[in-house]
Amino acid sequence: MTVAVTGASGQLGRRVADLVLASLDPGDVVLLTRSPETLGAHAERGVAVRRADFDEPASLVDALAGVDRVLLISAVDLGRRAAQHRAAIRAADEAGVGHVLYTSVPNPESGITAVAPSHLATEEALRDSGLAWTFLRNNLYAESQVPVVAQLIESARLVTSAGDGRTAYVSRDDCAATAAAVLVQDGHEGRAYDITGPDAVGPQELAALATELGGRPVDVVHVDDDALIAGMVEGGMPEFVARVVASFPEGAREGLLGSVSSAVEDLTGTPARSLRDVVTAHLAETLHP
């Protein structure tokens, strides 16, 4: 069986690639990227590194030649990626790929978080494609909260529109380990897995963690979505980006991000890392001296 990973030079893709190579012969692994030169060390090991661009469907067909199963890591451009993903799915079908794994999000049908519509469109395209599919619905990365906690320690103030909503933050490393495991295993066709951390964290718990690590109290200030967006824009964030960011506490408030699953441990055999573990491991790299 030959497996492929798209976006293999990115943070998630590179982690998946390295984990897959611990299980498979390099000759059975194909890494797809717009920048093949960044994966020279993998090519030297005997891995097939191929140029692939979601905006160039013909390149995808050629890049997927001989591949049996592919991990489609979601692209980053929210406005264009549904079309890019559909092109990749058509290319996989044309190239004879039998099974596509896709990195999605929890509850994509909700339409609330800014990323949900493009993920739902991709899931629907895969369901309609006739290909075998597996959805890895990754929750928000725990690593994204490391700079947040650092900022809370400095400001002693958490401004949020999440209310009492919780998020089951998951380590990027655990997402990679789960994707690699499913990519090399059989029996996951037609399954959708919620990939989460071991617990769901709300604003109070996040503030308490920052209080503990910083040594001074962090107050939680509850605002509505408009006020949160306005504050981020005032701080220099582009409005479009601010609206995307604000959609996640809204999703937490609506109960879309707080469900905890055992999928990481079930699929990899290793318990998921907690938000605390991730933050404490990386906080020193982020705090100002």
Image: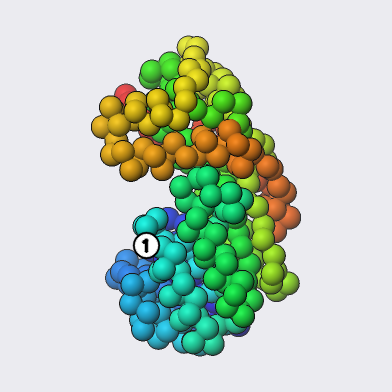
Q: Where residue 239 sits in the image (x, y, percent)?
A: 31, 38
Up-down relation of residue 206 to residue 144 (above or below): above
Q: Give the color scheme: rainbow, by chain, secondary structure or one colour.
A: rainbow
Q: Secondary structure at mark 1?
A: loop
* Amino acid type assigned to the residue bearing label 1 in the image: Arg
Q: Residue at x 43, y 75 (%)?
A: 87
Q: Quadrant of the N terminus?
A: bottom right
Q: Residue at x 61, y 63 (%)?
A: 135
Q: Is residue 96 left or right of residue 144?
A: right
Q: Is residue 121 left or right of residue 178?
A: left
Q: Residue at x 52, y 58 (%)?
A: 119
Up-down relation of residue 87 to residue 153 (above or below): below
Could one spot residue 171 in this view of the protein? no
Q: Where residue 18 sits in the image (x, y, percent)?
A: 50, 64
Q: Quadrant of the C terminus?
A: top left
Could one spot residue 35 in this view of the protein? yes
Up-down relation of residue 279 to residue 30 (above or below): above
Up-down relation of residue 213 to residue 133 (above or below): above
Which of 108 and 39 lies nearest the eye of the viewer? 108
Badge 1: residue crowd in 10 Å (few <14, some 14–19, many ≥20): few
Please count the marks in the image: 1
Q: Quadrant of residue 100?
A: bottom right
Which of 33 and 98 lies nearest the eye of the viewer? 98
Q: Where residue 44 sits in the image (x, y, percent)?
A: 38, 75
Q: Quadrant of residue 185?
A: bottom right
Q: Among all residues in the image, which is located at the extreme left?
A: 236
Q: Residue at x 47, y 22 (%)?
A: 223
Q: Among all residues in the image, which is located at the extreme top?
A: 216
For mark 1, what is the residue? Answer: 80
